[in-house]
Amino acid sequence: MSQQINLISPLLLKKRYAFGLREMALGLGVILAAALAWGGVLHYQAGTLETRAAQREALQATAQQELDQLNAAATRPVSALLTARVKATQAQVAQREALLASIGGTIEHTSTGFSPHLRALALSSTDGVWLNGFTLAQGHVALKGSALNAGLLTTYMDRLGKQTVFSGMPFSGMDAALAQSAEGGRADAAQRPEHIDFSLYSGSREKPSADQGDAHGQ
Protein backbone atom coordinates (compact mmCIF):
# COMPACT_ATOMS: atom_id res chain seq x y z
CA MET A 1 0.00 0.00 0.00
CA SER A 2 1.45 3.30 -1.16
CA GLN A 3 0.78 6.89 -0.05
CA GLN A 4 1.65 10.13 -1.89
CA ILE A 5 2.89 13.04 0.11
CA ASN A 6 2.81 16.62 -1.33
CA LEU A 7 6.06 18.17 -0.36
CA ILE A 8 5.28 21.57 -2.11
CA SER A 9 3.79 24.17 0.18
CA PRO A 10 0.87 26.20 -1.22
CA LEU A 11 2.51 29.29 0.13
CA LEU A 12 5.31 28.86 -2.31
CA LEU A 13 3.03 28.85 -5.39
CA LYS A 14 2.87 32.09 -7.54
CA LYS A 15 -0.33 33.97 -6.80
CA ARG A 16 -2.44 35.33 -9.72
CA TYR A 17 -4.15 38.70 -9.02
CA ALA A 18 -7.63 39.44 -10.36
CA PHE A 19 -6.54 42.86 -11.73
CA GLY A 20 -3.52 42.49 -13.87
CA LEU A 21 -1.87 44.94 -16.20
CA ARG A 22 -4.25 44.07 -18.99
CA GLU A 23 -7.30 44.74 -16.85
CA MET A 24 -5.82 47.98 -15.58
CA ALA A 25 -5.03 49.18 -19.11
CA LEU A 26 -8.55 48.30 -20.24
CA GLY A 27 -10.05 50.17 -17.28
CA LEU A 28 -7.91 53.22 -17.97
CA GLY A 29 -8.99 53.16 -21.62
CA VAL A 30 -12.68 53.06 -20.67
CA ILE A 31 -12.21 55.93 -18.20
CA LEU A 32 -10.32 57.97 -20.81
CA ALA A 33 -13.04 57.38 -23.43
CA ALA A 34 -15.75 58.40 -20.97
CA ALA A 35 -13.81 61.52 -20.05
CA LEU A 36 -13.41 62.47 -23.70
CA ALA A 37 -17.10 61.90 -24.36
CA TRP A 38 -18.11 64.01 -21.37
CA GLY A 39 -15.70 66.69 -22.45
CA GLY A 40 -17.32 66.72 -25.92
CA VAL A 41 -20.77 67.09 -24.38
CA LEU A 42 -19.61 69.96 -22.20
CA HIS A 43 -17.95 71.63 -25.19
CA TYR A 44 -21.15 71.34 -27.25
CA GLN A 45 -23.26 72.77 -24.45
CA ALA A 46 -20.81 75.59 -23.97
CA GLY A 47 -20.91 76.41 -27.72
CA THR A 48 -24.73 76.43 -27.67
CA LEU A 49 -24.79 78.74 -24.68
CA GLU A 50 -22.31 81.08 -26.33
CA THR A 51 -24.41 81.22 -29.52
CA ARG A 52 -27.56 82.05 -27.53
CA ALA A 53 -25.70 84.68 -25.58
CA ALA A 54 -24.42 86.25 -28.82
CA GLN A 55 -27.95 86.31 -30.27
CA ARG A 56 -29.35 87.93 -27.15
CA GLU A 57 -26.59 90.52 -27.19
CA ALA A 58 -27.39 91.30 -30.84
CA LEU A 59 -31.11 91.67 -30.06
CA GLN A 60 -30.33 93.86 -27.11
CA ALA A 61 -28.05 96.03 -29.23
CA THR A 62 -30.79 96.38 -31.90
CA ALA A 63 -33.38 97.28 -29.29
CA GLN A 64 -31.04 99.82 -27.75
CA GLN A 65 -30.40 101.37 -31.17
CA GLU A 66 -34.14 101.66 -31.88
CA LEU A 67 -34.68 103.18 -28.44
CA ASP A 68 -31.97 105.73 -29.13
CA GLN A 69 -33.59 106.60 -32.45
CA LEU A 70 -36.98 107.06 -30.79
CA ASN A 71 -35.47 109.26 -28.13
CA ALA A 72 -33.75 111.33 -30.78
CA ALA A 73 -37.00 111.67 -32.75
CA ALA A 74 -38.89 112.66 -29.60
CA THR A 75 -36.42 115.37 -28.75
CA ARG A 76 -36.21 116.64 -32.34
CA PRO A 77 -38.00 119.98 -32.87
CA VAL A 78 -41.19 119.95 -34.98
CA SER A 79 -40.64 120.98 -38.59
CA ALA A 80 -42.32 124.28 -39.45
CA LEU A 81 -42.92 123.10 -43.02
CA LEU A 82 -44.63 119.93 -41.82
CA THR A 83 -46.81 121.94 -39.43
CA ALA A 84 -47.83 124.28 -42.24
CA ARG A 85 -48.72 121.35 -44.49
CA VAL A 86 -50.86 119.77 -41.77
CA LYS A 87 -52.73 123.03 -41.19
CA ALA A 88 -53.26 123.49 -44.95
CA THR A 89 -54.61 119.95 -45.25
CA GLN A 90 -56.97 120.51 -42.33
CA ALA A 91 -58.24 123.72 -43.94
CA GLN A 92 -58.85 121.92 -47.24
CA VAL A 93 -60.74 119.14 -45.47
CA ALA A 94 -62.91 121.70 -43.66
CA GLN A 95 -63.68 123.50 -46.93
CA ARG A 96 -64.62 120.24 -48.65
CA GLU A 97 -66.86 119.22 -45.77
CA ALA A 98 -68.60 122.60 -45.89
CA LEU A 99 -69.03 122.29 -49.68
CA LEU A 100 -70.45 118.76 -49.36
CA ALA A 101 -72.85 119.94 -46.67
CA SER A 102 -73.98 122.83 -48.87
CA ILE A 103 -74.46 120.57 -51.90
CA GLY A 104 -76.34 118.03 -49.79
CA GLY A 105 -78.64 120.73 -48.45
CA THR A 106 -79.29 122.05 -51.95
CA ILE A 107 -80.09 118.60 -53.30
CA GLU A 108 -82.37 117.87 -50.35
CA HIS A 109 -84.14 121.21 -50.73
CA THR A 110 -84.60 120.68 -54.47
CA SER A 111 -85.82 117.11 -54.18
CA THR A 112 -88.24 117.91 -51.37
CA GLY A 113 -89.21 121.37 -52.67
CA PHE A 114 -90.78 120.46 -56.01
CA SER A 115 -91.88 116.85 -55.65
CA PRO A 116 -95.09 117.92 -53.81
CA HIS A 117 -95.93 120.21 -56.75
CA LEU A 118 -95.48 117.36 -59.22
CA ARG A 119 -97.61 115.11 -57.04
CA ALA A 120 -100.31 117.79 -56.87
CA LEU A 121 -100.32 118.13 -60.68
CA ALA A 122 -100.78 114.37 -61.01
CA LEU A 123 -103.64 114.30 -58.47
CA SER A 124 -105.41 117.18 -60.27
CA SER A 125 -105.66 115.26 -63.51
CA THR A 126 -109.01 115.84 -65.27
CA ASP A 127 -110.46 113.99 -68.23
CA GLY A 128 -110.41 116.23 -71.29
CA VAL A 129 -107.56 118.40 -69.94
CA TRP A 130 -103.88 117.74 -70.55
CA LEU A 131 -100.65 119.59 -69.83
CA ASN A 132 -98.18 120.31 -72.60
CA GLY A 133 -95.50 121.78 -70.32
CA PHE A 134 -94.86 123.33 -66.92
CA THR A 135 -92.35 125.50 -65.09
CA LEU A 136 -91.76 125.32 -61.32
CA ALA A 137 -89.64 127.81 -59.39
CA GLN A 138 -89.63 129.49 -55.99
CA GLY A 139 -92.72 131.74 -56.02
CA HIS A 140 -93.43 131.10 -59.70
CA VAL A 141 -95.48 128.41 -61.44
CA ALA A 142 -96.42 128.27 -65.12
CA LEU A 143 -98.68 125.64 -66.65
CA LYS A 144 -99.35 125.23 -70.36
CA GLY A 145 -101.92 122.80 -71.69
CA SER A 146 -105.12 122.19 -73.58
CA ALA A 147 -108.75 121.49 -72.71
CA LEU A 148 -111.72 120.34 -74.75
CA ASN A 149 -113.84 123.20 -73.41
CA ALA A 150 -113.84 126.02 -70.89
CA GLY A 151 -115.94 124.06 -68.35
CA LEU A 152 -113.30 121.32 -68.11
CA LEU A 153 -110.62 123.97 -67.67
CA THR A 154 -112.60 125.48 -64.77
CA THR A 155 -112.94 122.03 -63.17
CA TYR A 156 -109.21 121.46 -63.54
CA MET A 157 -108.41 124.82 -61.88
CA ASP A 158 -110.77 124.00 -59.00
CA ARG A 159 -109.07 120.63 -58.42
CA LEU A 160 -105.67 122.25 -58.64
CA GLY A 161 -106.64 124.91 -56.10
CA LYS A 162 -107.70 122.24 -53.60
CA GLN A 163 -104.16 120.82 -53.48
CA THR A 164 -102.19 121.96 -50.43
CA VAL A 165 -99.15 123.24 -52.31
CA PHE A 166 -101.28 125.34 -54.66
CA SER A 167 -103.93 126.49 -52.19
CA GLY A 168 -101.89 129.51 -51.06
CA MET A 169 -100.57 130.30 -54.54
CA PRO A 170 -103.29 132.09 -56.59
CA PHE A 171 -102.79 132.23 -60.33
CA SER A 172 -102.10 135.82 -61.33
CA GLY A 173 -102.47 135.36 -65.08
CA MET A 174 -104.29 133.21 -67.59
CA ASP A 175 -104.33 133.03 -71.36
CA ALA A 176 -106.86 130.89 -73.22
CA ALA A 177 -107.76 130.71 -76.89
CA LEU A 178 -109.09 128.26 -79.46
CA ALA A 179 -106.33 126.13 -80.92
CA GLN A 180 -105.28 127.15 -84.43
CA SER A 181 -104.47 124.35 -86.91
CA ALA A 182 -100.90 124.43 -88.17
CA GLU A 183 -100.16 124.95 -91.84
CA GLY A 184 -99.78 121.72 -93.76
CA GLY A 185 -101.59 119.77 -91.05
CA ARG A 186 -105.19 120.02 -92.22
CA ALA A 187 -105.66 116.24 -92.35
CA ASP A 188 -104.50 115.82 -88.73
CA ALA A 189 -106.49 118.89 -87.61
CA ALA A 190 -109.66 117.44 -89.10
CA GLN A 191 -109.22 114.31 -86.99
CA ARG A 192 -108.64 116.25 -83.76
CA PRO A 193 -111.61 117.78 -81.85
CA GLU A 194 -111.73 121.46 -81.20
CA HIS A 195 -109.92 122.41 -78.00
CA ILE A 196 -108.61 125.37 -76.06
CA ASP A 197 -104.94 126.10 -75.46
CA PHE A 198 -104.37 127.73 -72.09
CA SER A 199 -101.55 129.09 -69.97
CA LEU A 200 -101.73 129.66 -66.22
CA TYR A 201 -99.22 131.79 -64.32
CA SER A 202 -98.60 132.34 -60.64
CA GLY A 203 -96.04 134.98 -59.67
CA SER A 204 -93.78 136.89 -62.06
CA ARG A 205 -93.40 135.44 -65.56
CA GLU A 206 -89.83 136.68 -65.80
CA LYS A 207 -88.44 134.58 -62.95
CA PRO A 208 -86.02 131.82 -63.98
CA SER A 209 -87.39 128.34 -63.81
CA ALA A 210 -86.04 125.76 -61.40
CA ASP A 211 -87.80 122.72 -62.77
CA GLN A 212 -89.26 122.37 -66.25
CA GLY A 213 -90.90 119.49 -68.01
CA ASP A 214 -93.40 118.26 -70.48
CA ALA A 215 -96.50 116.38 -69.43
CA HIS A 216 -99.21 114.89 -71.57
CA GLY A 217 -102.37 113.30 -70.29
CA GLN A 218 -106.09 113.31 -70.64
Image: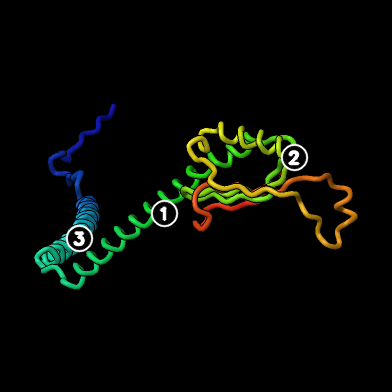
Q: In which quarter of the image is residue 33?
A: bottom left
Tag 2 residue? 149
Label 2 element class: loop
Query: From the viewer's perspective, is residue 130 above or below residue 70?
Result: above
Query: From the viewer's perspective, is residue 106 above or below residue 76?
Result: above
Labels 2 and 3 touching (C-beta < 8 A): no
Kind of residue sitting beneath label 1: Ile
Kind of residue sitting beneath label 3: Leu
Q: Where is residue 41 in the image (x, y as percent from the top left)?
A: 23, 54
Q: Quadrant of residue 46?
A: bottom left
Q: Where is residue 56 in the image (x, y as percent from the top left)?
A: 19, 58
Number of the front mark, 1 or 3: 1
Q: Position of residue 9 (x, y in %)?
A: 14, 39
In this orientation, does residue 54 appear?
Answer: no
Tag 3 residue? 59
At 19% across and 47% down in the image, what residue appears?
Answer: 19
Kind of residue sitting beneath label 2: Asn
Number of the front mark, 2 or 3: 2
In this orientation, does residue 182 appear?
Answer: yes
